[in-house]
Amino acid sequence: MVENLLEIKDLYVEYKTDKGFTGEKQIIHAVNGVNLDIKKGEILAIAGESGCGKSTLARAVIRLETSKSGEIIFEGKNVFEMNKTELKDYRKKAQMVFQNPYASLNPKMKIIDILKEPLKINTKLSDIEIYEVIKEKFEKVGLDIESLNLYPHEFSGGQRQRIAIARALVLNPEFILADEPVSALDVSIQAQIINLLRELKNDYKLTFLLITHDMSVIKYLADRVAIMYLGEIAEIGSTSQIFINPKHPYTKALLSAVPQISGEQQERIRLEGELPSAANLPKGCKFHTRCPNCMDICTQCAPSEIETGEGHKVKCFLYMKLNK
Ligand code: SF4
């Protein structure tokens, strides 16, 4: 059995908004009782609409957000209880690649200095050793070391994302959290970056948490998929379980919007209404306000998680009834 690298246990994250028109601060319930295991060497994708809580979850994993309650366990330690030294070590092992490579690279620094920075802060390597690491990683992501003395604006969007990936790699991490890593790029460049991530996963034996709203990216890259809705995991399974035999009505709606390579487009399931506000969560099943299969019970009670196949779990009363 493959070991877990990271375990998320009953995690709740909430934060307060600034005062709005009402003059009142609101509490946003961004992550609501998430349980997830990320296995060593896998790519686990978290999918869902914008505002579903997936980026907040990612930020909590890297401890850029604090939790209201729950645990995130990495190599046996709760990241929320790590001391300074343990946290420094965790941040070496767990790196993040952001959506917008231009915003995540300091425009006033040369690329060589951007890549040197984490090595200077976190290691005792000599200047020659640092250069060797940078050279290896820069070439690994497909860039020419002749360009190390350039500034971020002198690169294309795809090249900048390669630089951001090289920066994430210089400390030899075990775990990469990639938040919408290709969504800011041209479609023609997206495939190159997806291929690169896959190659890096195999060559460096990396584990990935991939955050994306793009089901096509997930289909190509992920080993398992968790579908998130209003801060909860609605369904989780292997990529083939989710794409071939989706259970949750929300998953089915997300997949119906994915273009098919065969050209045989399935009928699009259009969801009524907007995603409800995370400041005012619906009672019962959180999806009931938009669900085409909603029953009376769904408006009153929250379904618990049920396993419908090996590792394939769904929160929906439709399957609880079938399994009675
Ligand atoms: Fe739809 Fe009810 Fe299932 Fe929720 S529990 S997804 S409302 S059928």
Image: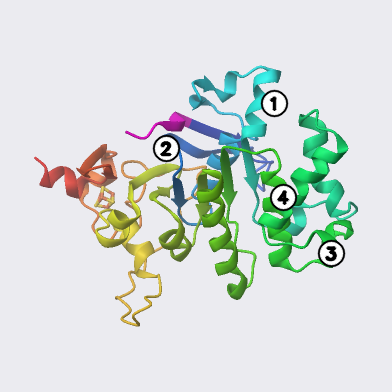
Image check: 130 left or right of 75? Answer: right
Q: At label 3, which amino acid type do we have? A: His
Badge 2 amino acid = Lys
Front: mark 4 or 2: 4
* Res. 247 image quadrant: bottom left
State the residue position of label 3: 153
Amino acid type at mark 4: Glu
Q: CA distance from mark 2 to mark 3?
A: 37 Å
- Range shown magenta: 1-11
Residue count near mark 2 (Cα–Cα under 10 Å), binned few <14, some 14–19, many ≥20: some
Return the residue at label 2. 39
Q: x, y percentage for residue 83?
A: 66, 17
Type of amino acid under label 1: Lys
Badge 3 residue CB within 8 Å of ligand 1: no
Magenta run includes residue 8: yes
Residue 274 visible: no
Lower sequence index among marks 2 and 3:
2
Q: Nearer the viewer, residue 300 or 287?
A: 287
**Could you tell me which quadrant the C terminus lies in?**
top left
**Badge 1 vs badge 2, beta-carbon distance below 8 Å:** no
Residue at image x 70%, y 19%?
84
Considering only vertical position in the picture, is 266 above or below 231? below
Label 3 neighbourhood size at 10 Å, few (<14), some (14-19), many (20+)?
Answer: some
Near mark 1 (Cα within 10 A), the count class, few <14, some 14-19 or many ≥20, is some
| Secondary structure found at label 3 | helix
Q: Nearer the viewer, residue 205 or 159?
A: 205
For label 4, the residue is 136
